[in-house]
């Protein structure tokens, strides 16, 4: 059975942090445009609703991760997943966005017709097929695959008598009290799970092939708490956001320009936090700071758990599993009742939605990213991608605003559509995401490319991007349709 919904100006795909933010900017900056938010799940929240493993929290401070238009007033700067989920929900209801969300709509394809100057979006809703048309499609589904996670092939895994779980699909009935737990991985998820499980488990071991740079930050922001005593909530929020963004981006630039000095600072801080006699090889990565994301532990909870003897770190490779646990290449073995494979995520471009333009399939890996959100040769479509070196929302909000201004520009100029130059950037290209993390490297053929100069680059610098966004040329390297006449700008 197929159902046809009425036409809207904009379809936003995803009702997570990005989708709600995009809807707000659209409703306030382009209030004459109609829109609908399509969400595959039965609840809003996106990542913060999907991931329910113990201790899940933000990996950047909430004054930069939260919405600029809705101050974060919670005392925690590094917030729990439940608090973030509630914050998104509250924002959606406060600004009338919740009523625009259509749940259970798993988008399967979206097809552009140049003749009609519109997208046809096809979703599955149980056994029903739903089609909707829109003038513009805005993907706000992030770049994680919600349906599949990444787990390497482990020899002998089928022989293991215990339970194996992946954090992305955390089972509600998992009882780890008094159990021996091995967490495979060294990223943000692994270092979050260790202290969160250690109080109840007999012991938690983090098994890593190579270490990650880890730093500790206060869970509560004293600067913000002081400002809120003398300033209105909005002003205090903006000042704290500016301060935190300056520190985060400033340290990123320092790491890139002076990697050896940054390495020394990070390793010295970490070494001072662990027990005497702790082998610092477990804290010493093989790469430079910010070649992969820096991991943050609030109030040093990871170090505190290690000092108590409730958790430990082992740096080695897996030889094979047996019935009782894991045998390592060094010959050492780790007994386990539960193994958590915090081994990474899978990247999915455009939410794995099939996209075509006049019947020609769009492969994002063969396209160039334009101003960090549109694809070469694809009209009236944007993809919200946040920063990798700072809070997601800092970049996402620039994208939300750009789309609203772009739609107003189409209206004001009498255009029905606009697309970045189909030829993309000249010269050499590079992956859109510049991290050496495994999940990024595994997806190089999935993600679009970036060029070496504007408007085909992603600079990973909020201050420069914010300046550019206020003076951006909406005609730059664009091809517009006006009635039946194509306009090259």
Image: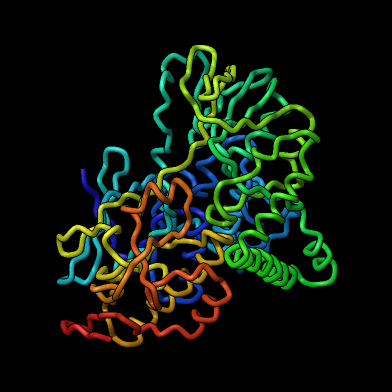
Q: Is residue 258 visible?
A: yes
User: On screen, 117 above or below 436?
Assistant: below
User: On screen, 488 above or below 125?
Assistant: below
Work out which quarter of the rendered image holds the C terminus and state it.
bottom left
Residue 300: x, y in percent? 75, 44
For the point 73% across and 27% down, the residue is 310
Q: Is residue 62 visible?
A: no
- The colour scheme of the drawn protein is rainbow
The quadrant holding residue 405 is bottom left
Pick the front one: 291 or 357: 291
For the point 48% across and 76% down, the residue is 29
For the point 55% across and 40% down, the residue is 210
Residue 104: x, y in percent? 38, 44
User: On screen, 260 above or below 343?
Assistant: below
Left or right of 150 in this view: 75: right
The quadrant holding residue 56 is top right
Pick the front one: 272 or 407: 272
Left or right of 404 in this view: 311: right
Pick the front one: 419 or 13: 419
Work out which quarter of the rendered image holds the N terminus and state it.
top left
For the point 40% across and 67% down, the residue is 373
Pick the front one: 7 or 202: 202
- Counting every numbered tag in the picture gives 0
Left or right of 465 in this view: 260: right
Residue 243: x, y in percent? 71, 69
Left or right of 209 in this view: 5: left
The quadrant holding residue 100 is bottom left
Residue 42: x, y in percent? 45, 43
């Amino acid at each position: 059975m197929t159902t046809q919904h009425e036409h809207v100006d904009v379809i936003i795909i995803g009702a997570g942090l990005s989708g709600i933010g995009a809807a707000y900017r659209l409703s306030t900056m382009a209030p004459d445009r109609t829109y609908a938010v399509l969400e595959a799940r039965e609840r809003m929240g996106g990542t913060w609703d999907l991931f329910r493993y113990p201790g899940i929290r933000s990996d950047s401070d909430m004054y930069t991760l939260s919405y600029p238009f809705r101050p974060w007033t919670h005392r925690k700067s590094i917030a729990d997943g439940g608090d973030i989920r509630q914050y998104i929900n509250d924002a959606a209801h406060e600004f009338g966005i919740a009523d625009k969300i259509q749940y259970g709509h798993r988008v399967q394809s979206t097809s552009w017709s140049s003749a009609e100057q519109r997208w046809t979006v096809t979703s599955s809703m149980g056994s029903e097929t739903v089609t909707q048309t829109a003038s513009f499609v805005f993907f706000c589904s992030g770049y994680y695959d919600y349906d599949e996670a990444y787990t390497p092939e482990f020899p002998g895994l089928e022989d293991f008598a215990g339970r194996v779980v992946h954090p992305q699909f955390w089972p509600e009935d998992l009882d780890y009290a008094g159990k021996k737990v091995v967490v495979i991985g060294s990223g943000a998820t692994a270092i979050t799970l260790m202290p969160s499980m250690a109080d109840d488990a007999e012991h938690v071991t983090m098994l890593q092939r190579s270490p990650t740079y880890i730093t500790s930050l206060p869970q509560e922001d004293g600067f913000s708490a002081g400002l809120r005593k003398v300033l209105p909530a909005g002003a205090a929020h903006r000042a704290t956001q500016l301060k935190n963004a300056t520190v985060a981006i400033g340290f990123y630039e320092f790491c890139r320009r002076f990697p050896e000095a940054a390495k020394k600072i990070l390793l010295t801080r970490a070494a001072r936090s662990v027990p005497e006699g702790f082998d610092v090889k477990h804290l010493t990565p093989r790469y430079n700071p910010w070649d992969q994301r820096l991991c943050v532990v609030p109030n040093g909870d990871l170090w505190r758990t290690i000092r108590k003897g409730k958790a430990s770190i082992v740096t080695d490779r897996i030889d094979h599993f047996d019935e009782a646990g894991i045998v390592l290449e060094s010959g050492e073995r780790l007994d386990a009742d539960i193994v958590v494979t915090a081994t990474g995520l899978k990247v999915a471009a455009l939410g794995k939605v099939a996209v075509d333009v006049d019947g020609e399939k769009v492969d994002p890996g063969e396209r160039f990213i334009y101003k960090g959100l549109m694809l070469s040769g694809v009209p009236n479509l944007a993809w919200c991608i946040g920063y990798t070196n700072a809070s997601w929302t800092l970049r996402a909000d620039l994208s939300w605003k750009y789309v609203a201004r772009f739609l107003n520009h189409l209206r004001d100029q009498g255009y029905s559509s606009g697309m970045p130059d189909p030829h993309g950037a000249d010269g050499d290209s590079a992956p859109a995401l510049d991290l050496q993390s495994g999940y990024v490297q595994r997806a190089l053929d999935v993600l679009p490319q970036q060029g070496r100069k504007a408007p085909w680059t992603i600079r990973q610098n909020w201050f420069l991007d914010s300046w550019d966004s206020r003076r951006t040329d909406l005609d730059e390297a664009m091809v517009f349709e006006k009635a039946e006449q194509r306009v090259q700008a």
